[in-house]
Amino acid sequence: MAAKTMFEKVWEQHLVAEPKGEPTLLYIDLQLVHEVTSPQAFEGLRLTGRKLRRPDRHVATVDHNVPTTSIADRLVIADQIANKQVAALRKNCADFGVQFYDVQDSDQGIVHMIGPELGLTKPGMTIVCGDSHTSTHGAFGALAFGIGTSEVEHVMATQTLPQEKPKTFRINVEGELPVGVTAKDIILDIIGRIGTDGATGYVVEYAGSAIRALSMEGRMTICNMSIEAGARAGMIAPDETTFKYLYGRRFSPQGLPETAAATDQRALENRSGARPSFALGQNTTGRRDLWREAVAHWRTLPTDPGAIFDRELTIDAATLAPRVTWGTSPGMVAGINGTVPSPDSVTEEADKKSYARALEYMGLHAGTKIEDIAIDTVFLGSCTNGRIEDLRAAAKVIDGYTVSTKVRAMVVPGSQQVKAQAEREGLDTIFKTAGFEWREPGCSMCLAMNPDILQPGERCASTSNRNFEGRQGRGGRTHLVSPQMAAAAAITGHFTDVRNWKFSKGAK
Amino acid sequence: MDAIKTLTSIAAPLPLPNIDTDQIIPKQFLKRIERTGYGEFLFYDWKRIQEGPDTGKPDTSFVLNKPEYKDAKILITEKNFGCGSSREHAAWAIYQFGFRVVIAPTFADIFFSNAGKNGILLVKLSEEDTETLLKRSTANPEHKITINVEEQLVTDEQGFKAHFEMDPFRKYCLVNGLDDIGLTLRYEKDLDAFEAKHDTEFWSTPKVTA
């Protein structure tokens, strides 16, 4: 058999029909639903008298619109139109039989946070959501992509989508990432290299030793921003890191209880420093060990040696530095030690125009050192960087310091689970002591649909994914950075190279 | 949605690349639960003076505020139009404002799909051909462009003629104004058979109960 890419394997395992001269009909294993892109889809079903074909393959939550201030503010949203939209989702889920995690639920959070947390997201699945950052779930070796509302309705009614087969693009990030350089810097670097349309029409597989060394949180950050390079989806091969993350989660396949022999074996492996195997369940009762079977299947998914991609790119991780966007597109990015570029530095006429417009909007001049750019606001959160590891990394930077008097800084954990975990670890105390606001979970200032918005001219160091004009509020100026870089900027009041950071007391 | 076969109209030029869906329809209009009423919010921020606090004063230099382009059914722009957010509200706003065709060298994937589902024809022309039409519509707001879907041709009164690619199935749907879900349900037997087998492959099945 011909060598296949991981994408091709997942694609082929979901083919429902391949009618001649028409797009392929692809089966969708899971659709995630939120309040903003679903009301018109549910309404469409009502108008045509259709039902959800598979309510058990749908999960809904509220994230885009919810205030992050207090429980009371979230239960009844002051913005009447937003409140009506959230109420519509509540009613639609009840009417159509969809599992719904409401604002007060301990599993509520940004839709791309809760899928992995609950173990809904698994290798080899097809996952969609009416949100472009659905690419996040590709970190588990799932084929996951964002869709529009008409397609949301299509999946509700048929559990399928007609799709043209995308091309494949492998990006190899090889070598060791320098200290202070993160997954966020890798993906910002990639977008800067290939442009915001550099992967249009492709599914990107991120591979290489630097990717394999990343935690699931880091892998999700990378896949999350695939759409910012125009990619249909991003994927990373499942491995022991993936299995370890998924083991024991609510919707993960359940293993059988371990035998005493298996427990002894695991203890031995742990002592010797060997990686624990997550397929240890012993079938002593004649029942199926679903975890073990699932892991065996997942191990067949990675790209075969010799498989051919339509395009490949290799990046040396050791050469990467912390990145800061300076413009109004995620591809407008510089190194922390760099300067704001001039429109003359690009050759294409269209790019010159974009650069000039971006500089004017951002209130910046060519030649300004990135480290000299002062900020007013820090936003730490979003489906890109609102996970526990992001909060830990930022807390480590600010521990023992105080937020600059000129800066307003806020942390919005990506989910209730992240918030609860951070509070168990005492991270909330570190943030609050330093002068950060500690908020309730949601999308918040990433897209500023809720009350968390920038004022005109305000400049923000943000761990989110888009720096488009007005994204965080009309006239607001967004610079995309990693959580560590956002934390350092909060303390100093301007962009600061976190590689030279003097960690204060008790930093572990 | 209406079927499109041919269209002749003046065109509004928007000569910028990478126009994202946040610009096409800003987030504050995504809170509505209706499918209509988005036309007036198309390019909301760009239609208003952007300097200083929001006074709501129109920016008369912006092309969609110019009375001479009021009747344009064609929008011409540069590469990577519709990038960013998957919001279908962007397609709804473009259609409900009155545009039926967008001409550009390239489009972002999700926007491309959303436009097709809403009867908007996206015409991909080369950068050079796009530039020619941008210049002509900028120089002369009355410059008329004709799109012939059957023949996949863009022409104008000054002898411009360019062929554009179109997926035959997409063309069939557009010309006939077909409902996608209805089309998929032609394969319901295949779907039933696939699902019966696939459901036993437990790793794919969330089995979520409300």
Image: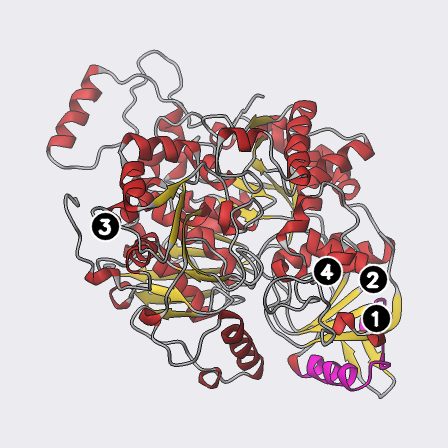
Q: Magenta stretch: give its range.
A: B128-153
Comparing A468 with A279, the one in front is A468
Q: Which residue is mark 4?
A: B42
Task: Return the disc, 1 or 4, that comes first in the chain's sequence.
Answer: 4
Of badges 4 and 3, the one in the foreground is 3
Of badges 1 and 3, the one in the foreground is 3
Label 2–label 3 contact, CB within 8 A: no
Residue at 15% in and 31% down: A269
- The amino acid type found where label 1 is placed reads Ala
Indicate the chain on which mark 1 is placed: B
Residue at 87% in and 54% down: B2
Query: Do discs 4 and 2 belong to a common subunit?
Result: yes
Task: Return the disc, 2 or 1, that comes first in the chain's sequence.
Answer: 1
- The amino acid type found where label 2 is placed reads Gly
Tell me the crowding category of disc 4: few under 14, some 14 to 19, or many 20 or more residues within 10 angstroms, Cα based: many
The answer to which image quadrant residue A81 occupies is top right
Is residue B21 shown in magenta? no
Q: CA distance from mark 1 to mark 3?
A: 57 Å
